[in-house]
Amino acid sequence: MTLAPAPSTSPAETREQLRRLIRAIEARPPSVPAPPRPFAVLRRDTPVYDLGTLGLEPRATPVGVCMVREVRTPMRYAEAAARDDDAFDFDDLARASASALPLLAPDADLEDVGLEELLFLDIETTGLGGAGVMTFLVATGRVEANAQGQSEFVLRQYFAPSPPDEAALLHALIEDGGVRDDDPVLVTYNGRAFDAPALDERATMHRQRAGFDALRHLDLLMPVRTAYRGLLPSCRLGEIEHAVLGMTRPTYEVSGAETPAWYFRYLRTQDARILAPLLDHNARDVLALASLTGRLAAVVEGTRTVEGVHALAAGRLLAARGRETDARTHLERVAAAPHFSPQREEARLRLAVLHKAAGRRDLAEPLWLAAAAQPGAAALRPLTELAIYYERHLRDHARALEVVERALGVVEGIARVDAALAGRWRDRLLHRHRRVHSRADRTAHPR
């Protein structure tokens, strides 16, 4: 039997067929969900707390029921602290101007963005990827006005008591967040790589349209890495929260890596008490996001003075954003420290780079001289800069030769520790030595 060849279709016809198929699928009425499960699954003979005791209330949606918790906190820290000694500080966020946010994410189109447009978001999932991974808990934060017209930070948490309730969670999240209509600015921590794509993928699985990945996005991990990489043990949100905001997570809190196991434990036991640490971890992540956004905005705007490591971090961030004058203010404070520290030496080198870029190598020279006094390989870069300055700009070949020979002596000293590094530097410096020596001879014996 000979099979007839399949009829050939053009790419345009294929795309139109796919569009018709998608429209037909979307036009189907949603399947009737099962009766709401949140309270039906709690057996009377099981010693558990009701989900309502955790502040979770049922939210009915066209695709089912999820649980939602809402907490409102005054934006003014003094008022919040009166209610909770462990309250996050929102003062910096309340004072942040529209000009600060573009400095944190220059490629995110954040010009003239108001605080009420920011949608802080953090999600908890049952894994890091794959078809079976679901989103069971999401926290959002927004600045909203209360009935008296005062600004409040509104934390909302969406919880799926069972895997089928994920569709209702996503529906409520999309509606409350105004993702389709209001075009909010998403604020996350590594959300560009995980949170936004994960939510869009899960919404598609439930035949919903989300669009989180298409929103303007302020991913705080990017400016934090620019500012603090190498200065702190890591750039994890908990580490940054402690170092920058001075907040310490409680010992009973569940870590992000542990949240899937706790959720599965809840599904097995239906003990609502298990959810308390999960809710607290999820809420703190969003509160930390909001507070950290305000703190970074205050630093780049100059409304908050920082010292030490944080001043160096501010100088790094401002220099990367093209704010050289403001960056110098922070770097000069660190470079003037009386005692040796790696931060002071880095600040001197970065400050010298800014002076060099501005055409003021005369201001960079004393910084290079100071940095060249460091032991070992750390002296090689400033010595090289001095050699270039003396050779090309001052035409002082004798001093340039002296500096190159000093650098070669440093290379011989580190050769016993790192032969490969010494070899690379030796080749460069010998080449420079020959060139400077040749120029010195031509100057001394012109034709």
Image (tube, rainbow, N blue to C red):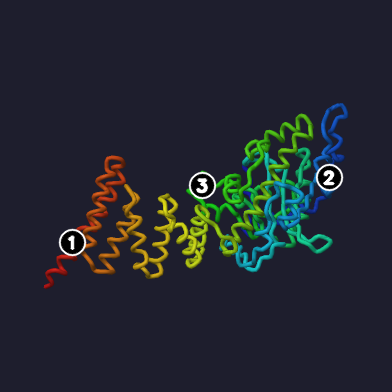
Q: Is residue 285 above or below residue 217?
A: above
Say which amino acid is labelled 1: His
Is label 1 or label 2 in front? Answer: 1
Residue at mark 1 to residue at mark 2: CA–CA distance: 80 Å
Nearest to N terminus: mark 1 or mark 2: 2
Image coords of residue 63 (percent x, y): 82, 47
Q: Amino acid at mark 2?
A: Glu
Nearer the N terminus, badge 3 or badge 2? 2
Asked if residue 18 is positioned above or below residue 445 in the image, the reply reads above
Crowd around label 1: few <14 · some 14–19 · many ≥20 (10 Å)? some
| Disc 1 target residue | 437
Give the mark, 1 or 3, whose residue is nearer the N terminus.
Answer: 3
Q: Quadrant of residue 267?
A: top right
Q: Check disc 3 and report the residue beneath it.
A: 232
Label 3 amino acid? Answer: Leu
Residue 57 image label: 2
